[in-house]
Image: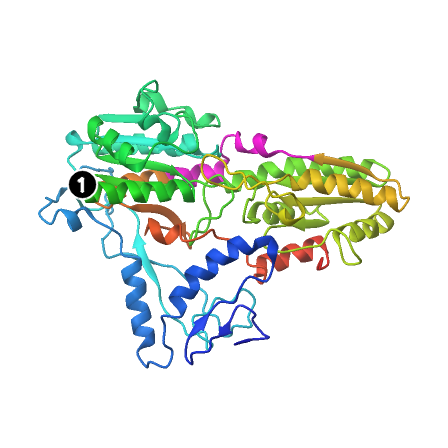
Amino acid sequence: MCISPKNPLLVRSARPGSLILPKPRSPTNSVRFHRVAAVAAARATAIDLSDPEWKLKYQRDFEERFSIPHITDAFPDAEAIPSTFCVKMRSPTYINTKDRVLLKVINYSSPASAGAVCIDPDCTWIEQWVQRAGPRENIYFRPEDVKAAIVTCGGLCPGLNDVIRLIVITLEIYGVKNIVGIPFGYRGFSDKNLPEIPLSRKVVQNIHLSGGSLLGVSRGGPTVTKIVDSMEERGINMLFVLGGNGTHAGANAIHNECVKRRMKVAVVGVPKTIDNDILHMDKTFGFDTAVEEAQRAINSAYIEAHSAYHGIGVVKLMGRSSGFIAMQASLASGQVDICLIPEVPFNLHGPDGVLKHLNYLIETKGSAVVCVAEGAGQSFLENTNAKDASGNKVLGDIGVHIQQETKKYFKEIGVAADVKYIDPTYMIRAVRANASDGILCTVLGQNAVHGAFAGYSGITVGIINNHYAYLPIPEVIAYDKSVDPNSRMWHRCLTSTGQPDFL
């Protein structure tokens, strides 16, 4: 097996005409890379590039994987009725069920091009289309028979109330009268002390003016069987689930269990992750707000560092397995000298380490600002193997570690240094959504309801190349989206910070 020197992610396998991904190169992100490699390699090795019809077969496989489940799959005789969704416009309100959105828009000419994602060594262009989101002319649920439930899971994220609000308002436009909220995530399905929360336009009208979730959030919860038992008892036949990868995995399991029991239920997800690590989507709600709010912390760190003698400001931002917030916030601020993310390994000590570069910045600039994602540099910290209620690994505090190691380093070399550490995580999570996220939440909430009434289930809705689309849940939870160290955006961040390669 040999690795292409132009693109280390493009690997020739021992079997002629096929491709696989290499083993992870860094212990700092080996778990994430193993998952990426496992999924991508399984698909890539199935492609026999020596077959003259491989492209056609790949397209067919893609269409099959991205075909979204519909009520008629389980209930072929399900009746389609004219839509009750009406907007007072002369122009067409509905979209055609055959409308599609292009998933990939860049035709890379070479694997050596920055950020190139290629299926074969020639970077053959293959069109990949996904289902366009929006209201359909025919629906598969009668509004008077619908009991819709909304649940918010995981941690807080700016925009949760905005999505809840628009789901409720859109349901009422369709004519649904029975709308409830399930309190405190999936836990609310089993805890008898947590009654349903009746929802209406009057209840949700102004909830978007504050952060948090009207319904509350929590991690973990009962088994899928108990959740579906509860849904059956309550008569819920539309479930809207707001959450990240783990929550969506739960939503998909709920959908499968409903199909197994032949329950006519629509389960629709709305991706909620402040880290922006959901596959295929341009961005998830809360991300823009997080980047904007992070500017306050970075600016405070800059002022503290710039005002002190040999001042160093360290800011830790969200990003368990992906560094999108840290990267974008560093780019936006223009005040960051070092940006550290989980996808790019680095050394703290040594001639090419972060601390050596900090000493250089102190000598040349007199101050420095470091922005680090929470999942970066975990190999430097003690591994407790502890997990939270969602099954996520409990991370060590890399921000505190960098602060302590920086103080220790400068003391050892006899140079005065004033190190300040800022962790704005919970302040950022709790704010209300900004205008950009507010618009995104509005459209996501509307399209989630349109998808449910159109008869789709086991789907999620997201923005792809500035258009809204429906995707099957398994395809967006295969692994976490992450920053490509070979991408132009990461290169732009490096240009902005001026930092070297810390290896």
Residue furthest toward the top? 193
Residue furthest toward the right? 414
Nearer to us in this view, 136 or 261:
261
Q: Is residue 43 left or right of residue 138?
A: right
Task: Indicate how the structure is coloured in the image.
Answer: rainbow
Nearer to us in this view, 379 or 487:
379
Where in the figure is residue 473, as x and y percent of width and height? 34, 49
The residue that appears at 55% across and 44% down in the rendered structure is: 320
The residue that appears at 30% across and 52% down in the rendered structure is: 132
Q: Is residue 365 left or right of residue 28?
A: right
Q: Dot 1 lies on which element?
A: loop
Task: Check the picture and name the quadrant holding the C terminus.
Answer: bottom right
Indicate the quadrant where residue 427 lies: top right
The residue that appears at 57% across and 31% down in the rendered structure is: 426
Indicate the quadrant where residue 61 lies: bottom left
Where in the figure is residue 254, as x and y percent of width and height? 28, 40
Where in the figure is residue 200, as x and y percent of width and height? 29, 23
Where in the figure is residue 448, as x and y percent of width and height? 31, 41
**In the depicted structure, whether residue 374 falls above or below residue 151:** below
Q: Amino acid at mark 1?
A: Arg
Nearer to us in this view, 37 or 476:
37
Residue, disc 1: 261
Residue furthest toward the left? 77
Mark 1 neighbour class, 10 Å CA radius: few under 14, some 14 to 19, many 20 or more:
few
Is residue 440 on the magenta stretch? yes
Q: Is residue 50 visible?
A: yes
Magenta span: 422-442
Number of dots carrying numbers: 1
Magenta stretch mostly in which secondary structure?
A: helix
**In the depicted structure, whether residue 42 falls above or below residue 267:** below
